[in-house]
Image: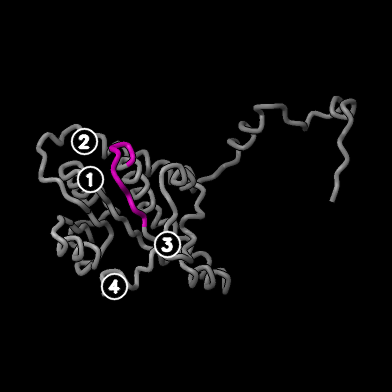
Amino acid sequence: HSFPTRRSSDLEECNWALTAGEIDDFTDSQNNEERKYFNSLVNLMERELSQIEKKSTLKGPKVNLIEVFCSDQSTLTEQVNQLGGKALRFGLNQGDLQQSEGRKRLLEAICRHRPEHVWVSPTCKPWSKWSNLNQQKSLELWDRIHAERRDMLSQVALCLVVCRYQHRCSRHAHWEQPKGSLMFMLPYLHELSRYMVDARPDMCTAGGPP
């Protein structure tokens, strides 16, 4: 398609044209409650981290890896320890990371042990291929899945804050999601492309024989 360019005389007769800079104000005027909610979570967790960092005067032994949102039998931590490194797990048994007390324990561990790597694997179910398919089957499923996504945004916000912190400390962060996950389509995560690289290892063979 082609669209003719309006003459300058036409533009002078109408007031809908946006001049340079006005597009930002126009965009900001659009109400986006989810974005506001996500940003409020990030700001809250950044404050929590800042307070903990200031109080973390006692340093523990440095570790190679802290694994977050993992099971008690996670292979990654097991492999690091078997190879002579030092890895710690932080799963449900260590604390509920959707609550402030659980986040406090995790952030204290990160500040205390200064891990070279942090590996986060937040819940992927609401953004999975199956959820994307199921949400199209009925309005009830659409509402349920989007409610689950909103509930899980606290996990996404925490992972973003941890990745930012590791980057500021010149250390490494890794964010695990299945190939088909829509989580990284969230516009709030676009900043990750500035300091993280997209990698797709075969997790099914991790720790297996060469």
**Residue 93, quarter of the rendered image:** bottom left
Circle 3/circle 4 CB separation < 8 Å: no
Q: Residues within 10 Å of mark 1 (few under 14, many from 20)?
A: many
The kind of secondary structure element at disc 1 is helix
Q: CA distance from mark 4 to mark 2?
A: 41 Å
The kind of secondary structure element at disc 4 is loop
In front: 159, or 201?
201
| Residue 140 makes an appearance in the image | no
Mark linked to residue 200:
3
> Which is nearer the N-term, disc 2 or disc 1?
2
Question: Where does the magenta region start and end?
Answer: 167-175
Circle 2/circle 1 CB separation < 8 Å: yes
Q: Residues within 10 Å of mark 2 (few under 14, many from 20)?
A: some
Circle 1/circle 3 CB separation < 8 Å: no
- Residue at the (15%, 64%) spot, across then down: 82
Mark linked to residue 53:
2
The kind of secondary structure element at disc 2 is helix
Look at label 3 and name its amino acid: Arg
Percent x, y of residue 19: 72, 27
In front: 174, or 209?
209
> Which is nearer the N-term, disc 3 or disc 4?
3
Q: CA distance from mark 2 to mark 1?
A: 8 Å
Look at label 2 and name its amino acid: Glu
> Which is nearer the N-term, disc 4 or disc 2?
2
- Residue at the (37%, 47%) spot, across then down: 160
Q: Quadrant of the C terminus?
A: bottom left
Q: Is residue 28 left or right of residue 36?
A: right
Mark linked to residue 210:
4
The kind of secondary structure element at disc 3 is loop
Q: Is residue 151 above or below residue 205?
A: above
In front: 136, or 138?
136
